[in-house]
Image (spheres, rainbow, N blue to C red):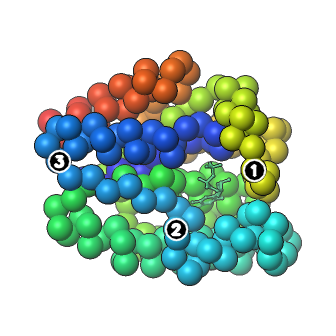
Amino acid sequence: MFIALEGIDGSGHTTQAHALAEALTRMGRQAYVTAEPSHGPIGKIIRDFLQGRVGDFKRFQESLTLLFAADRLHHYGTEIKPKLDAGIDVICDRYVLSSWVYQGLQVTEDWVRRTNQFAPLPELTLIIDTPISDAKQRRDIRGGIEEIYEVQHLQETIRERYLELAPSIHAVIINGAGTQDEVSKRLVKAVAEKLT
Ligand code: TYD
């Protein structure tokens, strides 16, 4: 099964992707965790930009949207599809819904949808809906470079957009409040329901 995990910055999707893979393994399945922006060549350009190392995509949001879409197609072809073809579950930490939400802040919905039209959709998209203040606390503890979207007022809008767009991709919203273990159990339950 192809699963995408989504949520605002600091919502714990990366940690939860790994916890979910472990749970699937315990269920006797094989699981592979990957992420977008990917670790491929296009993903590297995107990360360099997000962390302020290269380029001025801020004024060229359409180009940035194309980069995310190009990274997605390359990532799907080189990494995701081969695993799925081998019968391995793939958990992707962020996927197409991230573009709808984040790039949709600055470019038209039509532009985001058209540029992403070639990306196969996951069978299950899970949105971890974490309270804004909890997510900020996690980002503060994590430290490191503050990326361009990690601005508090944007995070509120991003959370609202996730909730608004969820039905269009049949995403399941998971309550992200509570301990890591509590959230993990909710995610596993949603996946188990999909598998039955
Ligand atoms: P990520 O490394 O997952 O950041 P975090 O762990 O802090 O959530 O993603 C980096 C940033 O990239 C994040 O702010 C969201 C953004 N992003 C987009 O804007 N569009 C996309 O399509 C993807 C995949 C990510």
Mark 3 vs mark 1, foreground winner is 1
Q: Position of residue 39 (x, y in %)?
A: 52, 70
Compare marks 1 and 2 and give the one earlier in the sequence.
Answer: 2
List the residue tagged with mark 1. Answer: 144
Q: Residue at x 46, y 32 (%)?
A: 173
Amino acid type, label 3: Arg
User: Is residue 152 left or right of 101 when viewed as pictured?
Assistant: right
Q: What is the quadrant of residue 92 in the picture?
A: bottom left
Q: Is residue 92 above or below residue 131?
A: below
Q: Quadrant of the C terminus?
A: top left
x, y percentage for residue 76? 39, 71
The disc at residue 38 is 2
Q: Amino acid at mark 2?
A: Ser
Q: Earlier in the sequence, mark 3 or mark 2?
A: 3
Q: CA distance from mark 3 to mark 1?
A: 34 Å
Q: Secondary structure at mark 1?
A: loop
The residue carrying mark 3 is 29
How many residues crowd mark 1 within 10 Å: few (<14), some (14–19), many (20+)? few
Quadrant assignment, res 186: top left
